[in-house]
Amino acid sequence: MSDISLTRRKFIKQSAAAGLALTLSGRTAKRAGAAEKGKVRLGFVGVGNRGTYLLRTALDLEGVEIPAVCDIDKDHLERARRLVEKSGAGKPEGYSRGPEDFRRLVEREDLDAVVTATPMEWHTRVMVAAMEAGKYGATEVPAAITVDECWQLVETSERTGRPCMMLENCCYWRNVLMILNLVEKGILGEIVHCETGYQHDCRYVTFGPDGGLLWRAQHVLSRNGNLYPTHAIGPAAWWMNINRGDRFAYLVSMSSKPAGLGNYIAKKYGPDHPNALREYALGAVNTTLIRTERGLTVTLYYDTTLPRPYDLIYRIQGTEGIYSGTLEKIYLEDRSPEEHTWEDTESYYREFEHPIWKALGETARNYGHSGGDYIELHQFIRAVRAGTQTPIDVYDAAAWSVISPLTEQSVAHKSQAVDFPDFTRGRWKISKKIEFLGI
């Protein structure tokens, strides 16, 4: 038993709240009143580049109003306020008194939900404050960066009855959804293994135009593990029915030596630049192996500090065949025309296109992250409007986000096995499908 498995805070005291938990069956999450006449009123916390993009997307969704925005950068704040005003709505109130000013925003009575796109170390604080104030929460990824923060999200959601959705856009990609449809129909047989990873050259968003450190760099300086797992693991977790019939049980993790960032700065700004000489904690490539309670396995990579093309892999293997997102190919033993030979996926999209992509794909294509940004917000707003559980719930947010601190512990202790907390307290055993709203 690892130390991590013992970090459940106040277990005995909090277990009494389990009866009030938001169940994974999609039970209605009761709110203090439905959204007025179908309107959904959002407050935004953090409107830099990512937050502004989410705000723009939300403004294009029917019935959305944005009465308030918050950011410590007043230029970002005013840009967001102008965008809302330009959409034909009234200019929202701005909050910028300091890093904690989101606490005033969440207390507004004219908000149904709060969306945050702050740096990751603020996500849990904003979400906990929003739920405590009776609001739905939606957070950029990851939802938390420590085990305790994951428990804070779960316990606050259970105690307040307010859902918290992590905005994992990759779960709503066309290929991810089509494969989910194949899995649920049994076309791939019994699922055995997934391989995935966040493999993305992110050096350009780690340093500023003069080689100075941006907020992401603070994590690279002090942490060593998989710091950004959810884009990779979210789709795999859906395919493997995590929290809906299975759960992540334990992992082992290993990091290569730190390399890449100093070399990058030296080439761009000279070998004497302070950040070319700095020591970085993060290993250049992190490799993690995860095993589920039902015996499925995942190979998970994190590779962001070396030159490389973007590739999330998305390979899934079952007893009847295999799909590769990197290749965008599929092989099914009793269906593919040539034995042991990949085939194109075009015919599978025609036959097994997911219903939500059929309903929203034409519009979603016009938005970022392969349409995922539009669909994730569409689903969140549908849940808020109806007063129901969100499709990606707080247990998903915790199980996917907790990979970061667990890998850090494993790496620090010579790749020892580390147990996952059971955030559902056993309710993962109830098998069910992913829910999609409004289709």
Image (tube, rainbow, N blue to C red):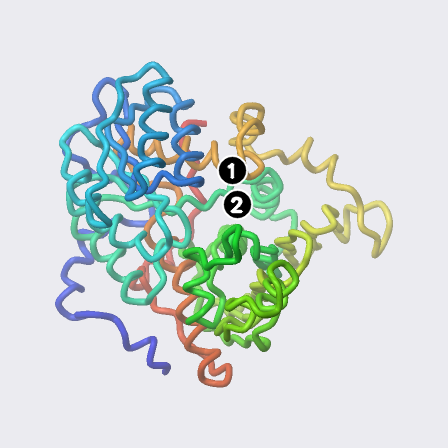
Secondary structure of the residue carrying tag 1 is: helix
Q: So how many labels did they put on this image?
A: 2
Q: Which residue in the structure is indicated by mark 1?
A: 372
Q: Give the side of residue 228 with respect to residue 163, left or right.
A: right
247 with respect to 395 (left or right): right
Q: Which mark is residue 166?
A: none
Residue drawn 44% across the image and 73% down it: 408
Q: Are marks 1 and 2 in contact (CB under 8 Å)?
A: yes
Question: Is 319 on the left-hand or right-hand side of 184?
Answer: right
Q: Position of residue 154 (x, y in %)?
A: 26, 56
Q: Position of residue 119 (x, y in %)?
A: 37, 52
Circle 2 sits on which residue? Answer: 170
Badge 2 element: helix
Q: Nearer the viewer, residue 215 or 111?
A: 215
Estimate the x, y position of residue 358 in percent, counting from the top left. 57, 27
Q: Amino acid at mark 1?
A: Gly
Image quadrant occupied by the N terminus = bottom left
